[in-house]
Amino acid sequence: MRRNLILSMLFAVIAVSSLICPAPGQVLSGDLIWRSGVGDRIAAVALSPDGLYGAVTTERMIYFYDQNGTVLWSYPVSGGRSVAVSSDGERIAAGGDHLLLFDRKGDVIWRYRPESRIQDLAIAADGRTICTGADTGLLVFSLDDGQATANVSGSFDAGEPIRSVSIDSDGTNIVAGADSGNIYFLGTEGRLLWNYKTGSNGVRVAISHDGSTIAAASSQRAVYLLNRNGRLLWKSSMAGAITGVSMSGDGSTLVLADGGISMLNRAGEIVGVYTPGEEERIRSVSTPADTTHLLAGAIDGTVSALRVQPETTPADTPDNPSPDTPVTAEPPRLSTASTQEQTTPQRGTALSPATPVTVSACVAALAWWRRQKQ
C-alpha cells in the first residue's frame, strides 16, 4: 500500500511538472536582412504597412530607411519618443517635445507644439489621420491633401496619461493604453466606444490593420487579446517585461519586444522566440501587414531588419477567421543566414523548463524501485 502511494506521488510530480512548466515556443534564429547602428538609445521603430520603408527615432534624431537599410534622410528632434510611417512612406510622423510630419524626402510638412511631451503616436495608412498620446490625453489630427496645417479633429481626456496609441489602416478606430492599465477604444473623433481594465500598469497597445483585433502588453509581463467589441479572447503571461508590441494586418500574429522577440499566434500560443546578444536588448519592434519581416530597435542603438518565413498554411485553414474565434496558426520561423554575410550561427535545441524536474523525478522513482527490489 505504502509502495503504491509513493509511486503515485512520484508520477504525479512528473505529470504536474510538465503542466506547470510547458515547453517554450520554437527558437527563432535571425535571417538578417540588414543591420545599422545609430549610436544612441533607440526609443521606437516603425515600418510602413507595406514594409518598404522604416523609421527609427532616438531622443535626438529620426532616421528614415528604405527596404535595403539605406538611410534616406535624418532629422534632429527634441525628446524623441515615437515614430510612425504611412503606406509607401508618403508621410512620417515623429513625436516628442514636438509633433513633426515629414514627406518621403524628409521635408517637414507640418509642426505642432503640444502642451506636454508626446509619449506615442500613430498614423493611418493614407497619412491623413494622426493620433497622439500624452500626459494631457489623446488628440486626433486630420490633414487632407494640399493642406499645410493639420486640424485637431478629435480629443479624449482619460483623466490619466496616455502612454500608447494605435490606429487601424483606414483611420476609423483608435486604441489607447493608459498608465493605469486601462485600454480605451475610440472612434476617429475621440468618442469613447468602450474601455477595458487590465490591472497592469503602463500597457502598450496595437490594433490590427482591419480593426478586428486589439492587443495589449504590459511591463508586468501580461499580454491581452481582445476583439473589436472589447471581449477578452485570452490573457497570457510572458517571461520578461514587454516594452513594445506589434500585430499583423489580420490580427493572426502578435510580435512582442521583451528584451528579445516573442511571436504569438491568435490562440495565444508562443510560436517563436528570438534571443539576441546580451548587449542587444530589443526595446521596440514593428511588423508590416503581412508579417513577412520585422524591424527591431535595441537599447544599444542597433537597428535590425529580420525576415520571417511562415510555414505553409494547411489547405483546410480558414482564409478569414472570425475575430471572435481563436485560430491556431502554424509556427513562423526566422532563418538565420544573413543575406549580407551568409553566416549561420549554430543553436542547440531549446529544452522545456520542465525537463530538469521531470528527469529528477524519474531518477528518484527508479532509485526507490531498485531499493525496494533489493
Image (spheres, rainbow, N blue to C red):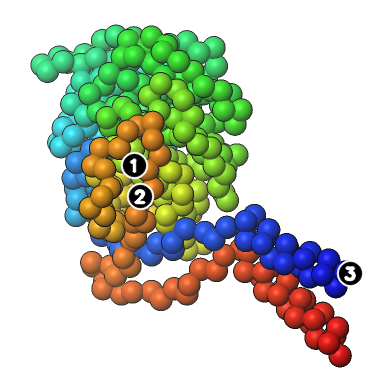
Cα distance between the residues tagged 3 and 2: 46 Å
Q: SS for tag 1?
A: loop
Q: Is residue 233 visible in this depiction of the protein?
A: yes
Residue under the image location 62 percent in, 56 percent down: 19
Q: SS for tag 2?
A: loop
Rendering quarter of residue 28: bottom left
Q: Which residue is mark 1?
A: 252
Q: Horizontally, is 269 left or right of 220 in the view?
A: left
Rendering quarter of residue 249: top left
Rendering quarter of residue 160: top right
Residue closest to the far front: 1
Residue under the image location 19 percent in, 54 percent down: 68
Residue under the image location 28 percent in, 67 percent down: 338
- Residue 109's tag is none
Tag in front: 3 or 1: 3
Q: SS for tag 3?
A: helix
Q: Which residue is mark 3?
A: 2
Tag in front: 3 or 2: 3
Q: Is residue 284 visible in this depiction of the protein?
A: no
Residue closest to the far right: 2
Q: Where is residue 207 shown, x and y percent of the image?
A: 36, 31
Of labels 3 and 1, earlier in sequence is 3
Q: Which residue is mark 2?
A: 329
Q: Where is residue 293 shown, x and y percent of the image?
A: 27, 52
**Which of 333/346 is in front?**
333
Quarter of the picture holding the C terminus: bottom right
Cβ atoms at labels 1 and 2 below 8 Å apart: yes
